[in-house]
Image (cartoon, helix red, strand yellow):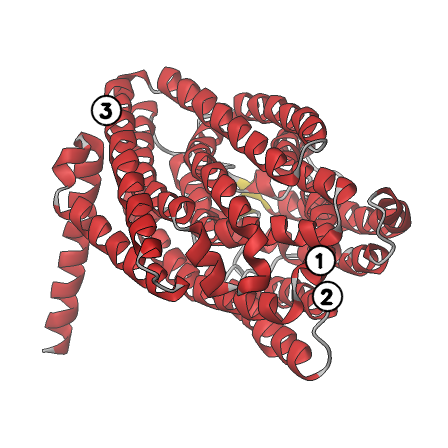
Amino acid sequence: MFSSCTRQCDGAAQNDQPMLSKALHAAAWGYLGTALKLVMQLGVQVLLARMLGPAEYGLFAIGVIVVSFALFVGDVSSTALVPREKLLIEDIRFAFTWQIIVSSAVALIVALLAAPIAGYINNDHAEWVIRTLALVCIFNAVGGVSLALLRRKVDFKRMQIAQVVGYFVGYVLLALPYALFVAPTVMALVIAWLAQSLVTSIIYFIIAPHSLRPLFMCANASELIRFGFHSAVANFSGWAMTNIDRVIVARAFPVAQVGMYSTAANLLSTPLSQVYATLQQVTFSSSSGLTNNHAGKVLTSLISLVIVFVGLGYTFSLTAAEPIVLVLYGAKWHEAVPFVEALSVTMFFYAIAGVISPLLWAQGAIHRDARIQAIMATLIAAGSIVMAWWSVLAVAWWVAAVFGMRALFLLSVGAKLFADTRSILLESLYRGAAFLFAAGLVFRGSDWILRDMNFSAAGRFAVLMLMFVLLLSGVVKSHRMMGKAFSESIELLLGKLHRAFRKLSGQQE
């Protein structure tokens, strides 16, 4: 617990464990919770999508776009608490005070702007959705500082407990019963998000309590606000990169197409966002204490793992989009297939950039990441407006192209910042690209053959999924062919798993 937070909070100042060991331990707990959330999230999304349909999901997507932007604006200083070497109790009080003030103001602004926003996208029904979801800004603010304290402690075990419980209450205990027994409408999704954010924040505060006494100014105020500003710029650009295209789609196309587009994006981003929610926080929280050389080694290891594992997953979704959509959502969602294909490319590039950004932040290069994101967000906005004259699919492919450019820019920055590991990074890139190209040919060719043999969508999905598992197992077994960084990472992970199983076996004996 954090009840012993004296004038200088112990935070991350005293730590007897090596940083990497602590990070791996945190990641292990993080991914245990991630696995639980992922199963629940995908299962609930599929069930609700089948019950609600594209139009209701389109309404919810509009509310999510607006409120997710507002959430970034509300975090003015709590994120700045994570990397601080010495954390004063006055810093915590200051951060919490302004988190509540700014988030409440933002919630009020969102509520007041709900009608104009609904008018802008030509959908009056979106007004009450946006106005109601504005409460999420306040609910999240309640637990914002407690979450920062948990991240500072790299306490992902209790963070995941809070998140799993919050999601379970919101979506499993409330949303599904509402859709089943009351009405299969967007209200089920609205209730779910409100309950999830409130319950999660309450649990954060219970396990990481802090003073609630307001403090409007402290000695480190300017430093905290400065970091919060840079963080807000980077987060705003990140929001714009992942949402501005949806704003334009919501403005230019019917709500059902908005639902198709958003649901395809959610299907592909859910596994990645759950994995990266832990990975990025662990990387940012733990790599602040690493030297430049060690951070470079972390970068090459993460990039190699992402290219092979995440890349293989999105290669699968790109080449098997039709059976995936038909099996999960049913025939009425068939128009989402081309969106799944385009967004698979987007998510792969997003994944690569997502492991570089926290390392840049931890090494003091947050301004570089913010600058690149701002440029790319501008490109997405301008290009999406033009592409919307053709089709929603044209917008989707333009976004994929911009995300590809962003990944290349960040890789270039990482190669310059961590020059000692540049050759290893390049080896991982070209070996990984060759592997994914070959895997894509295998998946696509197999699907064509299965379709010609009149296999059902479920049969095609099952066969392709089996092939995916075999390819994944094969690349792990033959890990040396993927280069030094991937090989060393796999050997480290396999070694740790082996020792864990031996320890477990000894305990049982």
Residue visible at 62% across and 44% down in the picture: 78
Would residue 52 be found to the left or right of residue 252 on screen? left
Reading the image, the residue beneath label 1 is: 60
The answer to which of marks 3 and 1 sits earlier in the sequence is 1
Distance of label 2 from label 1 (alpha carbons): 6 Å
Q: Cβ–Cβ below 8 Å for labels 2 and 1?
A: yes
Image coords of residue 132 (percent x, y): 80, 61
The answer to which of marks 2 and 3 sits earlier in the sequence is 2
Q: State whether residue 214 appears in this view.
A: no
Reading the image, the residue beneath label 2 is: 186
Residue visible at 55% across and 33% down in the picture: 397
Would residue 471 be found to the left or right of residue 79 on screen? left
Image coords of residue 267 (percent x, y): 51, 54
Distance of label 2 from label 3 (alpha carbons): 48 Å
Given residues 205 and 29, the one toward you in this image is 29
Given residues 284 and 251, the one toward you in this image is 251
Q: In which quarter of the image is residue 378?
A: top right
Q: In which quarter of the image is residue 177?
A: bottom right
Q: State whether residue 76 appears in this view.
A: yes
Report the quarter where the C terminus lies. bottom left
Reading the image, the residue beneath label 3 is: 427
Mark 3 crowd level (few <14, some 14–19, many ≥20, 10 Å Cα): some
Image coords of residue 508 (percent x, y): 14, 77
- Reply above or below: 235 against 90: above
Distance of label 3 from label 1 (alpha carbons): 43 Å
Residue visible at 35% across and 61% down in the picture: 454
Q: Nearer the viewer, mark 2 or mark 3?
A: 2
Image coords of residue 245 (percent x, y): 66, 37
Would residue 502 be found to the left or right of residue 264 on screen? left
The answer to which of marks 2 and 1 sits earlier in the sequence is 1
- Three-letter amino acid code at the position of disc 1: Phe
